[in-house]
Each structure stands twice: as structure tokens, then as C-alpha cells.
Amino acid sequence: MSRIRQTGSASAAAAAAETPCFVLLLLRVAAAAALPLLVAVLSAEGAAAFSPSVSSGNGALSTTKASCRSVGGAAGIGSSLYSTAEDEKVEGAERSADGGVLATTDEEDDDDEDEEEWVYEEYTDLTEPDFYNSEWKIGTVWNDRPNEIKETWVRLIVDDGGGGPGASSTNVAVWGDGARGKWNIDVPSQFFSVSKESFGGWLGKRIYAGNADDYYYLQGTVRGWSPIASASVLGQWQMKRLGVDRDEAGVAPWFQEEEEEEEDGEGSGAIEQVEASEEGEQ
């Protein structure tokens, strides 16, 4: 009897030891069977969440709200997608109501109008015929003598080279002291220049150049060089056309600039006086 009891207790112990193994085996089998089903469910939800649907409004692809909710979940992505979608709807409505352009405020419209203000001015480009056989009185202030104005005249003529076969015309400048040079007007840039040469340029040359922005008055700077000096700015010049009606020519532009500067100076002086009086009252 004692042997039988011992054998029975050993069998019970072995069965008890095999029971957890059997349970684990069942759990593994259940997990292996449920895993494909779980993967299929998750795949179906993911495909539904991210699959585009055709909108009935304009035929464009869009994501539904249900898909946004399923994607967002607890992470809060759905709310951000909703706000973006609503903003796009509002902007689309504004664009459609305004002809495809977002509505702007009155202040923005005023700024655009201020930026687009244009001033209409009539002007005529000067060409070579405007200078043919013209005579000018020219005054020069040299850098080494800033308080002295050296005046002379210059005549702009055209030398046809004798008019023979193959002859070419040359724009020649004849100065009041007998010196000669050349003159030129670049029409696209409206830049005028006239030179004064010493012995054909062997002993140096001076070039009077500036913008050709007036038919009656011109001004600019003098550049020159000599055998003992390199090219540099030597002074400033102003000249007016002779042989024309002075009333038609009007006031020289440099005198107009002086008047504007005086007016600006008077205005600033008055402002300073007002400020000084206000400080005295305080």
C-alpha cells in the first residue's frame, strides 16, 4: 500500500507540473490564431484612415473627418487637422467671393495707392542736331582756385572732312582761346562731353562732361591729365547756350537749387525758433 500511495503521489506531482505547460501552450496557440485577425483589423482601419475620398464639390481629393478622428485619437492630431480644414474652407470662400483674391483691408489698399503714385513729366532726349553750330558760355571753378570762376566760350561745329569720297564728319569744339577739341552726345544715356586739347593732346587733355538734361544749361565736372600728372578731377563747370531768348531759357537749374536750399534753411530756422520758445516756456 505504501508503494502504491507513493506512486500515486508521484503521478499527481507530475500532472501538476505538466498543467502550466499545457496552459502556456493553449495561450500560444490562441495568440498565433488571433494575431493575423488583429493585423487585418488594424490594416483595414489604417487604410480607411489614410485613404483619400473624392469630394462632391469640385472633384478634388480630400480626407474625411472620420479618418481625421481615427488618426488623431488621444494624440490630438485630429483637432489640428480640423482647424486646418476649416481655415482652408474659409479662405476658399473668401477667394471665391472676391474673384480668387483674398479680401484686403482699407489700410492695405491705401498703402498700395500711396506706393503707386506717379508723377508725369514731359521731357525730350537731346540729340546731335540740337548741338550743331551752337555756342556756349562756360565758367569753370578749378580745385586749386576755388574762389575764382574762369569764363570762356566754346563753339560746337561739325567738320565734314572736305566732303570728298570716304570723308567722315567729326564733331569739333573750338574754344575761345584758340584751342580745339571734340564733342559728343551719347543719346541713350544723355551724357555730354567736350574736350580741350593742348597741341593735339600731346601735352594733355581736359574733358568737360556731365548729364545733358537741359537744352539751355549744362553742368558737370572737369577731368584731365598731362605728361606730368595722372588723370584726375580738376574742377567743376557750368555753361549756358548763347543766341537764344533768355525768357524762353528761364532760370538756370543751379540757381533754382540755391533757392530751394534757402527755403529749406528758412523752414528749419523757423522750426528751431519754435522749439526754442517752447523750451523757454517750460
Image (spheres, helix red, strand yellow):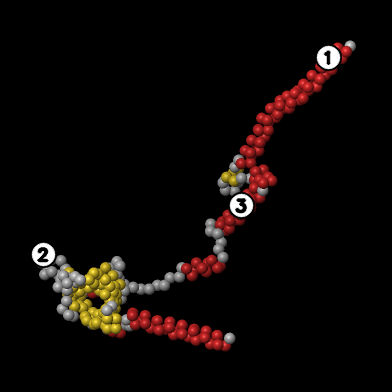
**Residue at the spot x=27%, y=79% of the render?**
144
How many numbered marks does the figure carry? 3
**Residue at the spot x=66%, y=33% of the render?**
39
Q: CA distance from mark 2 to mark 3?
A: 82 Å
Name the mark on residue 30.
none
Q: Position of residue 64 (x, y in %)?
A: 63, 45
Mark before the other along the chain sequence, 1 or 3? 1
For residue 155, what is the image quadrant? bottom left
- Is 77 left, or right, of 267 in this rendering? right
- Is 212 left, or right, of 24 in this rendering? left
Give the amino acid at mark 3. Thr
For label 2, the residue is 165
Q: CA distance from mark 2 to mark 1?
A: 144 Å
Q: Is residue 274 above or below residue 125?
A: below
Give the amino acid at mark 2. Pro
Name the mark on residue 84.
3
Give the amino acid at mark 1. Thr
Q: Which residue is nearer to you in this view: 157 or 173? A: 173
Q: Position of residue 37 (x, y in %)?
A: 68, 31
Task: Please say whether residue 111 is visible from this viewpoint.
Answer: yes
Q: Secondary structure at mark 3?
A: helix
Mark before the other along the chain sequence, 2 or 1? 1
**Residue at the spot x=43%, y=70% of the render?**
118
Q: Position of residue 227 (x, y in %)?
A: 19, 70
**Residue at the spot x=80%, y=22% of the render?**
16
Q: Position of residue 188 (x, y in %)?
A: 29, 66
Name the mark on residue 7.
1
Mark before the other along the chain sequence, 2 or 3? 3
Q: Callout 2: few (<14), some (14-19), or many (20+) C-alpha neighbours within 10 Å?
A: few
Quadrant in which the N terminus appears:
top right
Looking at the rendered image, the disc whose residue lies closer to the viewer, 2 or 3, is 3
